[in-house]
Image (cartoon, rainbow, N blue to C red):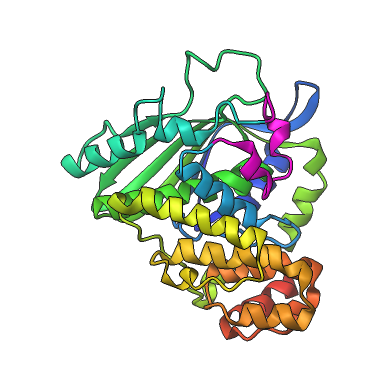
Amino acid sequence: MSNRYRNISFAAAGSFEEIMEKGDQVTVRGQLTREILNQVTVLDRPLERFLFLPGRLNDCFAQIAESIWVLAGRNDVDWLTHYLPRAPDFSDDRKTWRAGYGPRLRRWRESVDQVDEVRKLLVDDRTTRRAVMSLFDPGLDYVNSKDIPCNNWIGWLIRDGRLNMSIAIRSNDAMWGFSGANAFEWSVLHELMARWTGTEVGSATFFAASFHLYERHFNTAPSIVSRFHGISPYDFDIPRLPLSVSWSDLADRLAHWFELEQRIRTAPGEVIAELQLFDDRFLRGALEVLRLKWLEPQLTDTELAAEMANLDESDMVAATYQHLGRRRPALLRRMKHTKISSFFSAFEAER
């Protein structure tokens, strides 16, 4: 089956609905699921990456952190646990994700940076069909482990000046996998690869051999679908924060990013002038909103609203309002960002 959607918000709602209506009941490893086989989902605007679904309760901070962690080639659980507290539950040794995508992409068998190899292929031959990345390793992954890669292959094609991305997935939980992590993290790589190859971002196509929902979401999914009426911040002229770091600067920028992240996490009240000097707007914006994750427990509603008002209006800031507003509903009534306020007025009406 194949479905085409504008962005991840539309795709998630449509996928939940289709799985609940058409999916077969299958019990896998003792867990009941509803499953559709060989599902193809196309996102026409993958860079509209932030998920806005009433009742979905996604964590934008975790999405941002994990995506940058993967891009940096990391698989250490200690750092990721700051943003994904359950990360150790998916590790065999509670220290690393054995099959983490980061090392598979950036240091395959400790020697091949697949991101760089694909970049060079696409730059050298804009019609190439050889630009592929492998995430499943037959030499390592036919084992009993908590961590077998679900995303197995990524392919790239430039056509009509647009870079199209395809992802093959053996097993895809529509709730926490596809809409929670995969669409977001691969959109980051997609945007950067387009920049490095001088192309526009094309579509992102996800093929899932098993596309499913677990029983724990059988009631949640229809509720989310019924409350989504087809709007997202991108309908309100709210700008995205672009990724613009060059390939030659990537390693240094990421190293600096993680240094600053540690500082804002351990001392979020500290004024760090270097944040304003960070020249990639997405990476800088990520630090600004992650700082608020750690600072928020120390602030009153009025103080938090003032901190939010200091941020430039963007989709990332809208996602931060959504996340923090669940615990601080007064925050959604104190917005200084006019476009985001207009969006939430319509969004809250859906609830």
Q: Position of residue 224 (x, y in %)?
A: 74, 56
Residue 87 lies within the magenta run: yes
Check the picture and name the quadrant holding the C terminus: bottom right
Q: Whole-percent x and y of residue 294?
A: 69, 63
Residue that appears at 63% across and 48% down? 180
Magenta segment boundaries in residue numbering: 75-94
Count of residue discs: 0
Where 206 falls versus 350 (above or below)? Answer: above
Q: Is residue 323 above or below residue 206?
A: below
Determine whether 79 is above or below 258 in the image.
Answer: above
The foreground one among 134 and 286 is 286
- Judge left or right: residue 21 versus residue 185: right
Residue 54, placed above or below residue 207: below
Q: Quadrant of residue 51?
A: bottom right
Q: Position of residue 278 (x, y in %)?
A: 42, 66
User: Which residue corresponds to the image point at 78% horizontal and 67% vertical from the top-left?
Assistant: 297
Judged left or right of residue 273, residue 218 is right
Res 186 visible: yes
User: Which corner quadrant of the image does residue 236 belong to?
Assistant: bottom right
Q: Which is more toward the observer, 152 or 40?
A: 152
Residue 351 in sight in this render: no
